[in-house]
Image (spheres, rainbow, N blue to C red):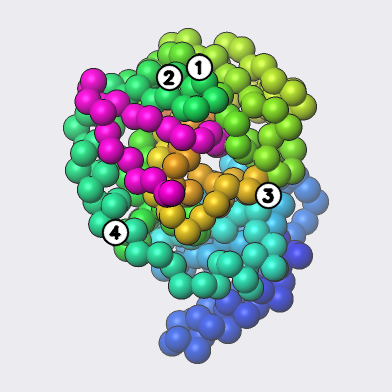
Amino acid sequence: ESEPLVEQGSQLASAVKEAGGRPTFELWAGDRPMTRAPQPILDAAERATLSFFLSEAPHPAEAPARFSVGETLRSHGGRAIYLGFVTPELLEGELSQPAVDLEEPARRLLAELEGSKRIRIRGRAGTDLTLDIEGRSWLTDALALEDRGFANYPGGEVFVAPLKHGADGVLVADLTVPYTIDGLVDEPVTLRFEAGRVVEISGGRAAQILRELISNAGEGADVIAELGIGLNPAVKPRGHVMLDEKAANTAHVAIGRNTGAYGGDNEAAIHVDCIFSAPEVEADGRSVDLPTVP
């Protein structure tokens, strides 16, 4: 948990205790960026059955340290819920409202996509990307969290980890690219993929920062990681990655790490979601009916 959210984290721990749980409350504090998670947090992850990780300003270079907490927890059957880029106002306002029940649209979309080998996804701003997903399972955060499960909050997506070499075409993120600029992108960020890797990034300031982020992150950072499709009709894109990627009528393609809960095998120091609007999906040549909002 990040220090600005001490009060909210304490309130959450109190609510867990009142519900009959035995909470441990630890701070993600120290010299930043951290190459390793704080030892008290790793110790707590060894024992915990459920983790809530609150972070107002997650540092991209600390992604491996954050990943290690989740993997430690999941190694003994624990579950993890991550709330990233959240403010006190968001936690106490919108995120405190009752969650939308998305089980039916999630199960329907999973059934339609499961077993497909090749996905073509297009978007209003120019995305046209072909992905090889043969043998990979579609997952969702819109159902009850099972043992060893991981989910962001709020929920509302189905997602898959494409094969390392299985991405060709163009991704145009016209909504949000985290770790670049605050809010919506200054202009669309275009990533060109060949055989699973990003070979060109163009656009404005957000594109420039993304190029630098990938360059500094090392091996695997430029590799296709995830395709996610938003389901949640209650969320509207506003330049907040953890919300925008859940919104109905959006999709996101990530680069970087997709091991662990994502279901892939590409190791990297970062995982960056690039979110775009008005997706259209074909699975093995069949048009897929996506949830939309008016």
Q: CA distance from mark 1 to mark 2?
A: 5 Å
Closest to the observer, 164 or 76: 164
Which residue does the image show at 70% across and 68% down from the upper left?
88
| Rendering coords of residue 140 (x, y %) | 34, 49
Asked whether, in this view, residue 117 is left or right of residue 197, the answer is: left
**Residue at (64% x, 26% y) in the render:** 188
What residue is shown at x 58% (from left), y 77% (from top)?
Answer: 12
Is the residue under label 2 in contact with that under label 4 (CB below 8 Å)? no
Q: In the image, which is nearer the foreground, mark 3 or mark 1?
A: 1
Tell me, yes or no, whether the highlighted magenta stretch contains residue 250. Answer: no
Would you identify the image quadrant in which residue 43 lies? bottom right
- Image location of residue 51, percent across then percent down: 50, 65
Give the Cα distance between marks 3 and 2: 29 Å
**Image label count:** 4
Tag 1 near tag 2, CB within 8 Å: yes
Amino acid type, residue under disc 1 in the picture: Val
> With respect to residue 151, does 164 lie above or below?
above
Q: Which mark is residue 129?
A: 2
- Position of 208 relative to 179 (above/below): above
- Classify 10 Å Cα crowding around label 2: few (below 14), some (14-19), many (20 and above): many
Circle 1 SS class:
strand
Q: Check whether the beta carbons of the residues at disc 1 and disc 4 lie within 8 A of each other.
A: no
Q: Which residue is mark 3?
A: 58
Which residue was labeled with disc 1?
Answer: 170
Residue 143 placement: quadrant: bottom left
**Residue type highlighted by circle 3:** Pro
